[in-house]
Image: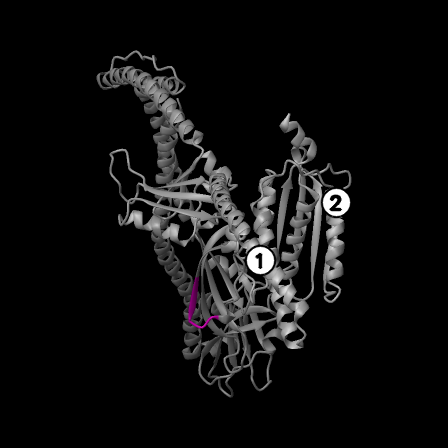
Amino acid sequence: MRLYRKTILFFIGVIAFQSILTILLITYLTSRANLADAQKGLEDESAVLYEGLNAWKRQLWISLITITNDRQFPRQFVRDRERSLRELLLLSKADAVAVKDPRGVGITTLSQTSPGVFTLADVQGLTRGRDHPYIELVSIRGSLCLLGASALSWPGGRPDVFLLKRLDNEFCSQLTLNRNSLVALLRGAQVLASTLPPGAAVGFDPRGMRTFDVQLYDRPLGGGRYNATFLRLGRLDPSADGEELFLATFVSNEPFNQKLLELDRAILLVSVAAALLTMLMGLFFSRNITHPIGELLGAMGRIRDGALDTQVQAPGGYEIGRLFDGFNDMARELAASRAASHSALQETVLLKEYNENIVNSIRAGIAIVNSDLVLEKANHSFLSTFGLEASRAVGAPLTYLDIDVIDEIIVERIFAIFRRETRYHQQVSRSRAGRVYEIRLYPFYSVEGEFHEGSGCVLMVDDISARTELEEKIFQAEKLSTISMLSAGMAHEINNPLGSILTNVQNLMDEESHPDRRVSLKWIEQETRRIARVVQELLNFASADSAHAPGSDVNEVVTEVAGLMRRSLGRDPGIRIEERLAPGLPPSAVSTDELKQVVINLLRNSIQAISGEGRIVVLTRAASAGGIELAVADTGSGIPREIVPRIFDPFFTTKRNREGTGLGLSVVYGIVNKHHGSIDVRSREGRGACICLRLPAMAATGRGAA
């Protein structure tokens, strides 16, 4: 039924639109025709009324000329004045006739059809302004009148004769007698006489007219609609600047409006009939088309809800029946296709989940980027390695992510793979946090086994920090082992000649009395002893026997060594040594002498790294698994990143002018490594360095031995 309602509403809307358009068009065309007819009728009616006014003028004029040229009228007037004037009234059809001696001699005679309309005083105020007969409009006691004036030829004088015709409402009624129009005489905007309904206002001021006449159409007047025309009649006093007189003609516009109304009603009736016919036709077609389509829509809705076994019964119509049969076939095929696609989808989902689980189970970080360096896919290891969130990382440019190991070389190699300049790239990068990563790049092939720009590039990142650290430790241990064996042999070989040299030098010093030669021998003795100390350090470095060494109190050793170092800094008070020692630490497995060597070497390196003022902090605290942590941090120049792996190499030094032997940190490394401890180096170049030692405790060592 929804389609039926839409169809009915559509056709009704079309009919309504067509009706409105037809009404507007016919109204427009009819209005134009009515306007032409109204203009023609208004012009004709105005001409008739104007001609009626002029007819009265002509009647007065003819009567005036007749009296003026009649030689018998003066004699008749003398014999019978009243009779003569009545005959003149009948001849002229005027309202009043007056004879007046202009010299004031004689009696003014007045005769009128209606007694009391004019008085002798009104007549005595009249004057003839021209020598010849004439007719003009005058106002007598507020009433508009036609005045005809002439002079009679009498013996002994020329008396004036006046014909008066009052232009009042009755006169206007005579003009519009048996006519379908209204008339009004206006003086300016003032109505002097009219056939208008009482209280009706003209609604137009003709004083602003610039032409002889003005026509107005469909104006309200006395509860109706009228067409009006205004004609100029001249002025009351042509010689003076008096107000103008106008003849207004009003013709009713109701016939034309009624014609339009009847046309609109006819069109509306036709439209309503067409709408009813459309509804009947729509009802007829709905039973044969809309209802079957509604059933088909309902079946489609059931299929959309999942009922793919839906079937509809075909009606009797041939086309509709074929449509229903096609729908049933489509529903059966759709059910079979959905079953097959559902099975394939389940297999695809399982395969996708299986592949994703494989990728996410790989410990190496794997990511795929496209030719725009946008990260399209990443496994859990890649995201967790660099602390990324999948929702923010996937879909973002690789260069926008905070991955410090992805440098310009990696980006250039990725573009090289997309340009097919290389098929593989591998490099090792170290992060700002000190982690070491092995980065490998591969082209990502499509399903068809081909590589193109839209395929992508595989970025594999493997954290090899532990392996690198182990390799470095093994390499360092191998170097130390080799150097230890060499140092032990060299120390024994050097000690014997050194002892002989030192003995002979001391004998020579006892026998020598010359001051200069004694000074030279003194220098030889000092340098020989210096060589002996270096050899002793080599022996200590090579020594690996710690089983006989008793434990040591870390805090006590730090306090003692720090005090000695402060006294040695008496000449350089700009360097401060602070101690932050945790109480209650267990004894360390490192002997007291070895621990003193470790602390002395670390503090000496920190002091030498500070130029000017600075601070050294020595910190101890309990570590996990029963160990002890000893850290020495300074605010010196720091250790350059590229030489951090070499600082524990024997004889490696950055000091100038032979200030060091390069064995200090090697001795520290050897002692800590001998007791199975660990060393961690953190440095920021230009801002200082921190060396943290993890030493075993005596209790932990004893348990390990047991």
Q: How far apart are labels 1 and 2 at the CA level?
A: 38 Å
Asked if residue 466 lies in the magenta stretch, the reply is no
What residue do we see at 45% from left, 80% from top?
133
Looking at the rendering, the stretch of residues picked out in magenta corresponds to: 209-215
* Nearer to us in this view, 206 or 502: 502
Circles 1 and 2 in contact, beta carbons < 8 Å: no
Question: Mark 2 or mark 1, which is nearer the start of the sequence?
Answer: 1
User: Residue 621 at what x, y percent from top left?
Assistant: 71, 41
Q: Is residue 84 visible?
A: no
User: Residue 49 at what x, y percent from top left?
Assistant: 42, 61
Residue bearing the label numbered 2? 555
* Residue 594 as seen in the image, left or right of residue 33: right
Asked which secondary structure carries label 2, the reply is: helix
User: Residue 207 at what x, y percent from top left?
Assistant: 51, 71
Residue bearing the label numbered 1? 498
Asked which secondary structure carries label 1, the reply is: helix
Given the current orientation, which residue lies at the most extreme bottom position? 156
Location of residue 295 by image quarter: top left
Asked if residue 210 lies in the magenta stretch, the reply is yes
**What amino acid is labelled 2 in the image?**
Asn
* Nearer to us in this view, 354 or 207: 354
Location of residue 660 by image quarter: bottom right
How many residues crowd around disc 2 within 10 Å: few (fewer than 14), some, or many (20 or more)? many
Residue 342 vs 58, above or below: the answer is: above
How many residues crowd around disc 1 within 10 Å: few (fewer than 14), some, or many (20 or more)? some
